[in-house]
Image: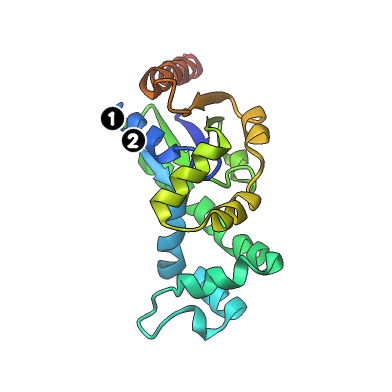
Amino acid sequence: MRLKIGITGGIGSGKSTVCQIFATLGIPVYYADAAAKRLMVEDEALVAGIRKLFGEAAYDAEGQLQRQHLAQIVFQDRRKLALLNALVHPAVARDSLAWHAAQTKAPYTLKEAALLFESGSYQQLDQIICVRAPRALRLERVIQRDGITIEAVEARMAQQLPEAEKGERSDYLIENDGQQLLIPQVQRIHRAILARAGALRN
């Protein structure tokens, strides 16, 4: 049995950095956000659903998703955001399971997703890692990374579960506070997951 491990955390917590360390250990990583962006263009059923929900203006003449147009709508209308998520999350869940099944040489796989608990996709996974960082540091990271206002970052944070709740519901914690080294934390969790995978095989 190949374990499916989730990795989550609030926006700006540093999930991608942690995933890169796991990747150097030979663990394949599925990035749910990148997959969602791809599927919103490539998955015919999902594209049809988005067009029905948001109209033809959701895509340009070349079939490219008008992300800013969509973002302006959903971040001002929680009902529309919920309807969009109800279309996207199941498509990503199906895609991630197919991807996991293809990773035949890996001892386990990682699925990176900010909305792991919110989307319900945690139910498909065997264990969860939560990456945590102080709120002020997360705000600073996202503002520098995305070039957006503090209000815009806080609006995104409001769409996610509180970090404390994510941590309580996870099996492993990684502290990315700029003080504690990440690599030893990742290595410790990696060894624990390998041990669990080995015990399940025996």
Where is residue 127, by image quadrant?
top right
Residue closer to the observer: 141 or 86:
141
Alpha-carbon distance for marks 1 and 2? 6 Å
Residue closer to the observer: 181 or 62:
181
- Residue 88, percent from left and from top: 55, 61
Q: Which mark is residue 24?
A: 1
Image position of 63 (left or right of 55): left
In this orientation, does residue 113 appear? no
Q: Is residue 56 above or below residue 38?
A: below
Badge 2 crowding class, 10 Å Cα cut-off, few under 14, some 14 to 19, many 20 or more, is some
User: In terms of secondary structure, where does tag 2 sit?
Assistant: helix
- The residue depicted at 45 percent of the width and 14 percent of the height is 195
Q: Which mark is residue 86?
A: none
- The residue depicted at 54 percent of the width and 68 percent of the height is 71
- Residue 52, percent from left and from top: 59, 80
Where is residue 183, by image quadrant?
top left
Badge 1 crowding class, 10 Å Cα cut-off, few under 14, some 14 to 19, many 20 or more, is few
How many numbered marks does the figure carry? Answer: 2
- The residue depicted at 43 percent of the width and 16 percent of the height is 188
- Residue 14, percent from left and from top: 44, 37
Disc 2 residue type? Gln
Disc 1 residue type? Thr
Q: Which mark is residue 20?
A: 2
- Residue 154, percent from left and from top: 60, 52
Residues at badges 1 and 2 in contact (C-beta under 8 Å)? yes
